[in-house]
């Protein structure tokens, strides 16, 4: 086992610096890495791709040569203008566990996901994008985790982002489910592409068309409202950034519109009374991180976050104490330190007697005394 892990980790490390060399080592080491257990369930791997000829061969091989021996790769394609589909067909001729679903007209990624789900008939579904790469033991590790934790519906992992210059950046996610859920107020909580799902859960929800470029974010909200998720605390996924990826102003506006819909869903779940301006304010300052323009805008943020906490106490959607701590540390504290000298005594009393403020009577008294002395 230790030797298998060592070889797998070496391959994974090499993938970001010398991809061809890593893949050659992977091919020649496959028989040593692969599990010999024949009684394992099949894992469906759901992928969608459009024009990825430069990367798709290695991406597919990183699925086919997994240490977990029973994988069924489902590839859904929109009409491609490069050699992507030809490469898939060449690999399909060598590996019978690849199913290619070709769309004759452009469907877009969300509809492609839902088309692909119809071809996933086994008990587990893994996600992956076919310009990325994965650890040789990814599915083995994630399957073992789900097998040992029947209360978990989805397990994701940490990932590394890498580019054409071989530069890498680590992305980790919170391992506490309550904090994963709370972080939905700010961003998509875990990696979608790095996840292994119990098939029944993903099939239950599917992907919704109104959340373009944020369909995974919407999916997490619906799953986490009913089921528990987890993160395998190891780097098992390599997310590739490259020049073919396009992020333009129009796409950013589409993403923002999807975020607004997701926040609407969350606030409705919390039973909040709000308007469109409130949602836009939350998106701009809590999700996009736009700077606050002075004390009055910070006080507005304070009132909004305090109201969110109070509504959550009734709905119990989030863990109450962890939500308070998360907001205090990650959203509230810096603003208070920045604007506290500008607060009136009335403002200060409002703030320190709110649900966000963390402090006992003595702490509050000290804040009032400091304020009076400064004035």
Image (cartoon, rainbow, N blue to C red):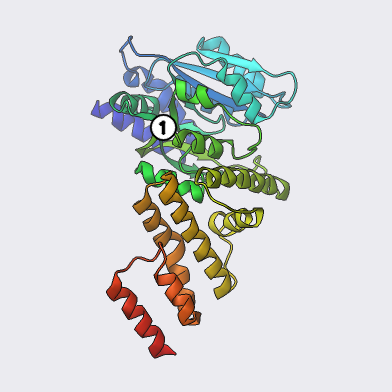
Give the percent coordinates (x, y) of residue 319: 37, 47
The residue shown at (34%, 13%) is: 40
The residue shown at (51%, 35%) is: 222
Which is nearer the eye, 176 or 96?
A: 176
Q: Secondary structure at mark 1?
A: loop
Which is nearer the eye, 365 or 211?
A: 365
Give the percent coordinates (x, y) of residue 158: 41, 40
Q: Residue 105, can we see it?
A: yes
Query: Is residue 236 positioned above or below 148 on the image?
Result: below
Which is nearer the eye, 258 or 158?
A: 258
Query: Is residue 148 positioned above or below 218 on the image?
Result: above
Q: Which residue in the protein does label 1 denote?
A: 227
Task: Report which quarter residue 83 is drawn in.
Answer: top right
Q: Quadrant of the C terminus?
A: bottom left
Say left or right for 68 vs 48: left
Say left or right for 352 vs 131: left
Q: Residue 125, can we see it?
A: no
Give the percent coordinates (x, y) of residue 165: 54, 47
């Amino acid at each position: 086992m230790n030797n298998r892990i060592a070889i797998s980790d070496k391959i994974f490390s090499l993938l970001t610096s010398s991809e061809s060399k890593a893949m050659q080592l992977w091919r020649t080491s496959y028989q040593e890495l692969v599990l010999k257990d024949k009684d394992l369930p099949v894992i469906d791997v759901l992928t969608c791709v459009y024009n990825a000829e430069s990367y798709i061969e290695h991406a597919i091989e990183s699925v086919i040569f997994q240490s977990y021996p029973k994988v069924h790769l489902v590839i859904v394609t929109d009409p491609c203008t490069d050699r992507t589909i030809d490469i898939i067909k060449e690999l399909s001729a060598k590996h019978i566990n690849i199913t290619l679903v070709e769309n004759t007209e452009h469907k877009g990624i969300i509809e492609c996901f839902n088309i692909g789900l119809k071809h996933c008939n086994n008990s587990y579904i893994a996600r992956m994008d076919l310009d990325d790469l994965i650890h040789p033991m990814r599915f083995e590790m994630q399957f073992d985790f789900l097998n040992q934790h029947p209360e978990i519906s989805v397990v994701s992992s940490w990932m590394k982002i890498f580019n054409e210059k071989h530069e890498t950046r680590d992305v980790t996610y919170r391992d506490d489910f309550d904090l994963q859920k709370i972080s939905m107020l700010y961003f998509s909580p875990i990696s979608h592409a790095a996840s292994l799902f119990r098939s029944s859960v993903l099939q239950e929800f599917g992907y919704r068309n109104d959340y373009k470029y944020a369909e995974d974010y919407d999916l997490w909200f619906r799953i986490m409202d009913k089921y528990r998720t987890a993160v395998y605390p190891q780097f098992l996924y390599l997310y590739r950034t490259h020049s073919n990826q396009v992020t333009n102003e129009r796409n950013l506006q589409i993403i923002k519109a999807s975020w607004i819909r997701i926040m609407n869903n969350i606030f409705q779940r919390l039973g909040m009374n709000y308007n469109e301006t409130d949602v836009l304010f939350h998106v701009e300052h809590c999700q996009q991180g736009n700077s606050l323009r002075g004390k009055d805008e910070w006080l507005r943020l304070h009132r909004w976050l305090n109201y969110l906490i109070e509504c959550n106490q009734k709905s119990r959607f989030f863990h109450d104490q962890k939500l308070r701590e998360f907001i205090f540390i990650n959203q509230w504290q810096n603003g208070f330190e920045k604007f506290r000298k500008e607060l009136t005594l009335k403002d200060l009393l409002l703030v320190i007697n709110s649900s966000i403020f963390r402090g006992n009577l003595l702490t509050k008294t000290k804040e009032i005394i400091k304020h009076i002395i400064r004035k």
